[in-house]
Every structure is written in structure tokens, then in C-alpha cells.
Image: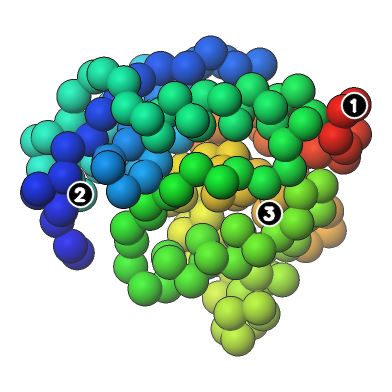
Amino acid sequence: MNIHTLDRVVTTSLDSPVGPLLVGATDDGICLLEFAEPARQQVQLAALRRQFGDAVEPGRHDHTDRLAEELAEYFAGARREFTVPIVFPGTPFQQRVWGQLLAIPYGETRSYEDVACALGMPAASRAVGRANGQNRVAIVIPCHRVVNKGGGLGGYGGELWRKRFLLDLERRGPGA
């Protein structure tokens, strides 16, 4: 695991239709977008500290401001893709899974098996599910677009009602 001790992570909270969000950014980009429930928030902040050292502090950053604007557009149905830079350190396998998540088009879903097959590892559905659940940049890296093989919602760390909300928002399309 690479520890980026020279990076400072600035965190802030944003309001959204799915509840408060905790955002973290380095000078390289957004490294955290998580639902700000106390239990999840503590886990994610601990993971950031392991990844980036103790340089995690509240504040504002150009990347968090830009993400706030892009999220507002997304929730208004006016944005289909995020352009804010993201930083998502992980294992090589996690990186590959998260890259596949980024390739899932707005308004569409893929099964865990679909993602595993796209990686050339059709038997790795469970590992894909684990990596999907370890995504620290929710919404922007669209882990909500991964569903069970039969189309059921499956699990979602941010709770199923949020996953349903995000999928319904995207199915309605831009401007809806």
C-alpha cells in the first residue's frame, strides 16, 4: 500500500438530496465522497488517515467546491458525468474494478458478474462486490450502478434507499 504522507486531505460536508455527504480532497483531486452517517464517517476517516497519514483536516478546497457544483447539477438532472479530478488509491485489482465502474454509462446498470467478465475474471463476482464496497468516492465512481445478476439492487454501503434514489434519478434522465 502506498502511503501519501506529503498530501494533505481537506474534508468538508455537503448537503444533498440523499443526506449529508463527507468530501475529502487532496491537491490531486477528490479522494473521498461518502454518506456522512457517524459510523460510516469514522470508518472512512480512519481509512483516509491510513492512506494519507495524519494530514486530514477540515476546510475548503477548490476540488471540494467544484464537486459541490457538479453534485448540485447531477442531482438537478443536468449532469451525467463528473469532471472533477479523483484520486482513488487501492490495490491493482480494486483499481481495475473501479475503472470498470467509471465505464458504466449514466442511467445503466451492470451486474457484479458483468464487471467480473469485463475484467476477464468471470469467477470473481464476489471479489468485485468487495472492491465495489470499498470504493471511497461514491456517486462519482458509480458503485450504485452495480446490481445483482437478476437486476435486484443487492447491497449498498450507503443504504438501499439511496441506491434506489440514485438509479431512479439517472433513469429519469437529464432535466427530469
Q: Which residue lies furthest to the bottom in this view?
A: 120
The three-letter amino acid code for the residue at tag 1 is Ala
Using residue 45 as the reference point, say whether residue 78 is left or right of it: right
Mark 1 lies on residue: 176
Between tags 2 and 3, which lies in front? 2
The three-letter amino acid code for the residue at tag 2 is Gln
Q: Is residue 94 above or below residue 62?
A: below
Classify residue 103 by image quadrant: bottom right
First-in-chain label (1 vs 3) = 3
Using residue 89 as the reference point, say whether residue 156 is left or right of it: right
The reply to whether residue 62 is in sight is: yes
First-in-chain label (2 vs 3) = 2
Classify residue 136 by image quadrant: top left
Residue 95 placed where, x, y %?
Answer: 43, 66
Using residue 140 as the reference point, say whether residue 44 is left or right of it: left
Residue 27 placed where, x, y %?
Answer: 27, 42
Residues at marks 1 and 2, CA–CA distance in whole angstroms = 39 Å
Element assignment for label 2: helix
Residues at marks 2 and 3, CA–CA distance in whole angstroms = 25 Å
Mark 3 lies on residue: 146
First-in-chain label (1 vs 2) = 2
Mark 2 crowdedness (10 Å alpha carbons): few <14, some 14-19, many ≥20 = some
Q: In this view, does 73 lie above or below 154?
A: above
Mark 2 lies on residue: 51
The three-letter amino acid code for the residue at tag 3 is Val
